[in-house]
Image (cartoon, helix red, strand yellow):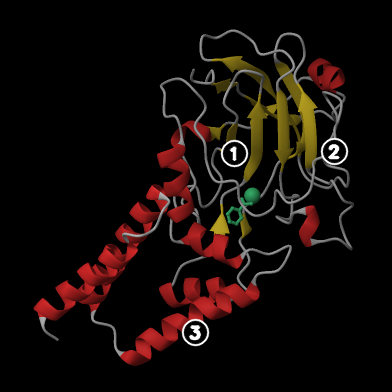
Amino acid sequence: MTTEFTTHLTEAVVDSIEGTSDPRLRELLAALTRHLHAFVRETEPTMAEWERAVGFLTATGQTCTDTRQEFVLLSDVLGVSMLVETVNSDGREGVTESTVLGPFHMTESPARELGANIDLVGGGEPCVVSGRVLARDGSPLPGAVLDVWQANAEGYYDVQQPDVQPPGNGRGLFTADSEGRFRFRTCVPSPYPIPTDGPVGDLLRAMGRHPYRPAHIHFIASADGHTPVTTHIFVAGSEYLDSDAVFAVKESLVQDFTETDDPSLAREFGIPNPFRHARFDLVLNPVRS
Ligand code: BEZ
Ligand code: FE
């Protein structure tokens, strides 16, 4: 392989992109070409390796359905989803950090009253999640909307077990009160494995990696005049906090689910005593003008 030929090849492909009328698409295609060509020059894959790579990407596409997105999962386990998320986040001091959306926000969460139980089945450790939705200056955001979803105590989402869990189990759409407060009941989530029965599972096994995510609850918080945040809270002390299969843990999102033995508070929350209590505030950025 002559270096001169490959350099000309890269330039010829980049030149061929020049006519792309959308300037951003032109920039993306040119950078993609340069990086892909640099990868091939560095690693010099054999024809058999190249065919295997094409076969892997083909199988990844063929595994996608209306309810399964294997390409997003591939992006997740290679840390690309987290990188895209992070380069797009506002990053201003004091606001709640974002993390991946994940593939299980595929159904609409049912609207529920503040204080409602999203664990429609029971069986897990009872827990209250409460806090406030605030603006960056500390003022409450009354009427802020919180979309919440989580796996059950065994680590499965409702959509993964349509014959076992009722639709909407582990999900709720809550509206914060006049002081921006929110509160709901649930069970303490467990760590769970991402789907491993497709090409991404084969890839994880080839890399000797486990498929687990630490215990977490997903949130999308939104309020008028503010940028919504897609995030999780992670259960402090959960297994896999330091080896999340999709690299989505940020230190600020790890929250204590405190053991609470307080019969009068339990009565106020309508939960059996003792219970676990996660308390935290979600802080949103004003929309930039
Ligand atoms: C999730 O937390 O729901 C998730 C995120 C990325 C990949 C798989 C699952
Ligand atoms: Fe999840």
In the image, residue 239 above or below residue 270: below
Give the number of callouts: 3
Judged left or right of residue 84, residue 280 is right
User: Residue 65 location, x and y as percent?
Assistant: 70, 68
Of the two numbered discs 3 and 2 in the rendering, the one whose residue sits closer to the viewer: 3
User: Residue 83 location, x and y as percent?
Assistant: 42, 48
Q: Which residue is mark 1?
A: 232
152 or 63: which is nearer to us? 63
Judged left or right of residue 155, residue 19 is left
Q: Upstream in the sequence, badge 3 or badge 2? A: 3
231 or 63: which is nearer to us? 63
User: Residue 136 location, x and y as percent?
Assistant: 51, 14
Q: Secondary structure at mark 2?
A: loop
User: Which amino acid is tagged 1?
Assistant: His
Rate crowding at label 2 as few (under 14), some (14 to 19) or many (20 or more) other CA atoms within 10 Å: some
| Residue at the spot 49% in from the left edge and 17% down from the top edge | 289
Q: Which residue is mark 2?
A: 110
Q: Which mark is residue 55?
A: 3
| Residue at the spot 65% in from the left edge and 70% down from the top edge | 64
Q: Upstream in the sequence, badge 1 or badge 2? A: 2
Instruction: For ligand 1, tell me if the residue under mark 1 lies within 8 Å.
Output: yes
In the image, residue 32 above or below residue 147: below
User: Which amino acid is tagged 2?
Assistant: Pro
